């Protein structure tokens, strides 16, 4: 009988010990979708610091200009076109238009119309390393965008961003931009063969 009670006691003790064991927390799975890496909704706002460097080699006397401005982008309106949501975004004194279109993010400089094929293809799913596409799919030749990393980490004045997508382009000597999950564009950089360069970095953001 004592052995029987001893076995019951050990079983209860082991059960209690196992039941109290803490499970290791699991990080939420990153959704590699365009909507997550370029979130668009009315009221979304991004504030950037834009820096441009120009060595003015063609100017006499030789001079260098470093220009810094604060740039604000806001989604101000949404409307429908052929059943797709079009998001109107203002940036300083001009507006552009973005469309989620069957696994693509299309950017129009003017309000799109039915059958409009003049657009820039900013993103194309699947968002995975090695994925590439033409920036101007309607042209005979075009610059190529390619995802070079889906685990990029970036430090900015607005904080650190992990699990970013870094996309490079053959548009110039060096050209890339970085998208953070749930935020969107956090950095863009372009450098030309003459040494001039441009950088855009996130300062603040408000995602609805």
Image (spheres, rainbow, N blue to C red):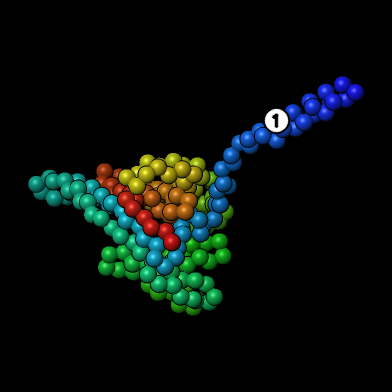
Which of the two residues, 88 or 43, is positioned nearer the viewer here? 43
Task: Examine the rendered structure and indicate whether residue 51 appears above or below residue 86.
Answer: above
Residue plotted at (48% across, 51% down): 181
Task: Examine the rendered structure and indicate whether residue 141 appears above or below residue 58.
Answer: below
For label 1, the SS is: helix
Could you say where residue 153 lies in the image, as x and y percent from the top left? 44, 41
Q: Is residue 154 left or right of residue 191?
A: right
Which of the two residues, 126 or 49, is positioned nearer the viewer here? 49
Q: Residue furthest front?
A: 1
Which of the two residues, 133 or 23, is positioned nearer the viewer here? 23
Task: Examine the rendered structure and indicate whether residue 13 appears above or below residue 39.
Answer: above
Could you say where residue 105 lies in the image, as x and y percent from the top left? 48, 62
Q: Is residue 203 left or right of residue 40?
A: left
Could you say where residue 139 lies in the image, as x and y percent from the top left? 45, 64
Q: Is residue 99 visible?
A: yes
Q: Is residue 121 visible?
A: no
Residue 41 is drawn in which quadrant?
A: bottom left
């Amino acid at each position: 009988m004592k052995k029987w009670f001893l076995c019951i006691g050990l079983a209860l003790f082991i059960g209690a010990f196992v039941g109290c064991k803490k499970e290791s927390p699991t990080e939420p799975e990153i959704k590699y979708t365009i909507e997550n890496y370029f979130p668009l909704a009315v009221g979304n706002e991004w504030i950037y610091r834009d820096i441009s460097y120009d060595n003015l080699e063609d100017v006499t006397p030789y001079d260098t200009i470093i220009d810094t401005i604060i740039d604000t982008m806001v989604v101000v309106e949404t409307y429908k076109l052929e059943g797709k949501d079009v998001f109107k975004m203002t940036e300083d004194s001009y507006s552009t238009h973005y469309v989620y279109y069957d696994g693509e993010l299309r950017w129009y400089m003017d309000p799109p119309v039915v059958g409009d094929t003049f657009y820039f293809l900013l993103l194309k799913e699947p968002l995975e390393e090695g994925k590439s596409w033409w920036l101007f799919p309607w042209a005979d030749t075009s610059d190529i965008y390619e995802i070079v990393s889906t685990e990029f980490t970036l430090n900015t004045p607005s904080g650190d961003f992990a699990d970013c997508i870094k996309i490079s382009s053959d548009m110039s000597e060096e050209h890339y931009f970085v998208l953070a999950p749930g935020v969107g564009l956090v950095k863009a950089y372009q450098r030309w063969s003459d040494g001039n360069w441009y950088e855009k970095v996130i300062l603040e953001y408000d995602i609805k």
